[in-house]
């Protein structure tokens, strides 16, 4: 894999260095972890559809848009508290 340079303001670089150091990691690893674990909106939609299909097929549970949105809000709130 070849490396690429990403330009960010010095303040962002310094913040990334602090976060990486606190995790016992490097900025490179931190950015790589972020890129690998962060889903695009399209990827989130696809995952949600696969999950809905799985729940329907394996458990007979139909999850509607409103239920899905409500659960998403609850999860975001729970993660924000921690």
Image (cartoon, rainbow, N blue to C red):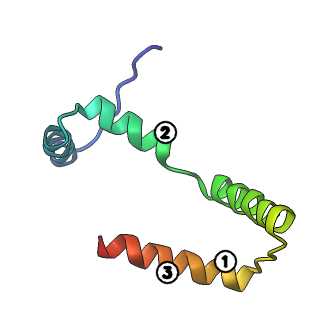
Q: Residue 74 carries which label?
A: 3
Q: Is residue 55 above or below residue 25?
A: below
Q: Which of marks 3 and 2 is in front?
A: 3
Q: Dot 3, how many residues are within 10 Å of its Cα: few (below 14), some (14-19), or many (20+)?
A: few
Q: Name the residue under label 1.
A: 68
Mark 2 highlights which residue? 36
**Disc 2 element:** helix
The residue depicted at 31 percent of the width and 76 percent of the height is 81
Report the residue at 35% width, 26% height from top: 5
Dot 3 or dot 2: first in sequence order is 2
Do residues under tags 1 and 3 come within 8 Å of each other at their CB atoms?
Answer: no
Label 2 packing within 10 angstroms: few (<14), some (14-19), many (20+): few
Foreground label between 1 and 2: 1
Gap between marks 3 and 2 measured at Cα? 24 Å
Q: Where is residue 58 in the image (x, y as percent from the top left)?
A: 82, 62
Query: Which quadrant of the view contains residue 79?
Result: bottom left
């Amino acid at each position: 894999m070849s490396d690429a340079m990403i330009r960010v303001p010095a303040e962002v670089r310094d913040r990334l260095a602090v976060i990486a150091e606190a995790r016992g990691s490097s900025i490179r690893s931190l950015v790589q972890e972020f890129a690998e674990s962060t889903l695009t909106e399209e990827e989130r939609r696809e995952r949600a559809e696969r999950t809905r299909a799985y729940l329907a097929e394996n458990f007979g549970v139909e999850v509607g848009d409103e239920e899905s949105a409500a659960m998403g809000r609850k999860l975001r709130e729970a993660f924000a508290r921690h």
